[in-house]
Image: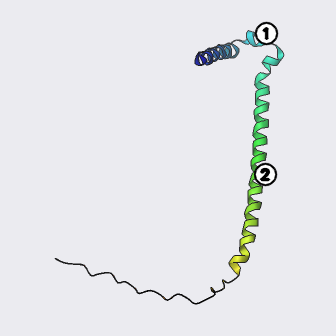
């Protein structure tokens, strides 16, 4: 049943949009707020896009700052030579050579 409600709403919106787009008289008779709806929607869209771009820009700056801090934290480790491990080194085990191919 829920799908039928969506279908009915789509039909109503489609018919209303068609009438609005094709009938200048219908547009004139609509109340002022209904006639300004496309302008309001356009303004809201532009505001939303602007806010999203600003948020994206600030997030990008935040990520770059975090990466720079991370690089600085690891730069000291990369520049310092590694100290040899304490204690005796384990002896290298015997090397194993591959067996020659077996013809037979």
Residue 50, placed above or below residue 43: below
Residue 43, placed above or below residue 59: above
Give how far across and how far down residue 74 sits, in percent.
Answer: 71, 72
Q: Considering depth in this image, is 25 or 76 the residue closer to the camera?
A: 76
Residue at position x 78%, y 22% in the image: 37
The number of numbered badges drawn on the structure is 2
Give how far across and how far down residue 7 sits, in percent.
Answer: 60, 17
Q: Does label 2 or label 1 sit earlier along the sequence?
A: 1
Q: Quadrant of residue 23?
A: top right
Which residue is disc 1 drawn over? 29
Q: Secondary structure at mark 1?
A: helix
Going by the image, does 28 lie left or right of 5? right
Q: Nearer the viewer, mark 2 or mark 1?
A: 2
Q: Considering depth in this image, is 38 or 78 the residue closer to the camera?
A: 78
Which residue is disc 2 drawn over? 58
In this view, the residue farthest toward the left is: 104
- Image marks 2 and 1: residues in contact by CB distance under 8 Å: no
**Quadrant location, the N terminus:** top right
Going by the image, does 23 lie left or right of 35? left
**Quadrant location, the C terminus:** bottom left
- Disc 1 crowd rating (10 Å Cα; few below 14, some 14-19, many 20+) is few
Q: Quadrant of residue 98?
A: bottom left
Residue 94, placed above or below residue 102: below
Give how far across and how far down residue 73 sits, in percent.
Answer: 74, 70
Residue at position x 76%, y 52% in the image: 59
Going by the image, does 59 lie left or right of 18? right
Residue at position x 74%, y 48% in the image: 56
Q: Considering depth in this image, is 55 or 100 the residue closer to the camera?
A: 100
Q: Secondary structure at mark 2?
A: helix
Mark 2 to mark 1 CA distance (whole Å): 45 Å
In this view, the residue farthest toward the front is: 87
Q: Considering depth in this image, is 40 or 78 the residue closer to the camera?
A: 78
């Amino acid at each position: 049943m829920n799908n039928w409600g969506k279908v009915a709403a789509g039909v109503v919106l489609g018919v209303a949009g068609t009438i609005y787009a094709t009938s200048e008289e219908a547009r004139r008779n609509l109340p002022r707020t209904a006639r300004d709806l496309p302008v309001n929607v356009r303004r809201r869209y532009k505001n939303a896009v602007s806010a999203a771009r600003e948020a994206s820009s600030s997030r990008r700056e935040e990520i770059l700052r975090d990466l720079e801090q991370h690089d600085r934290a690891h730069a000291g480790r990369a520049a310092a030579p590694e100290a040899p491990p304490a204690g005796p080194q384990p002896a290298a085990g015997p090397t194993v050579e591959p067996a020659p191919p077996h013809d037979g």
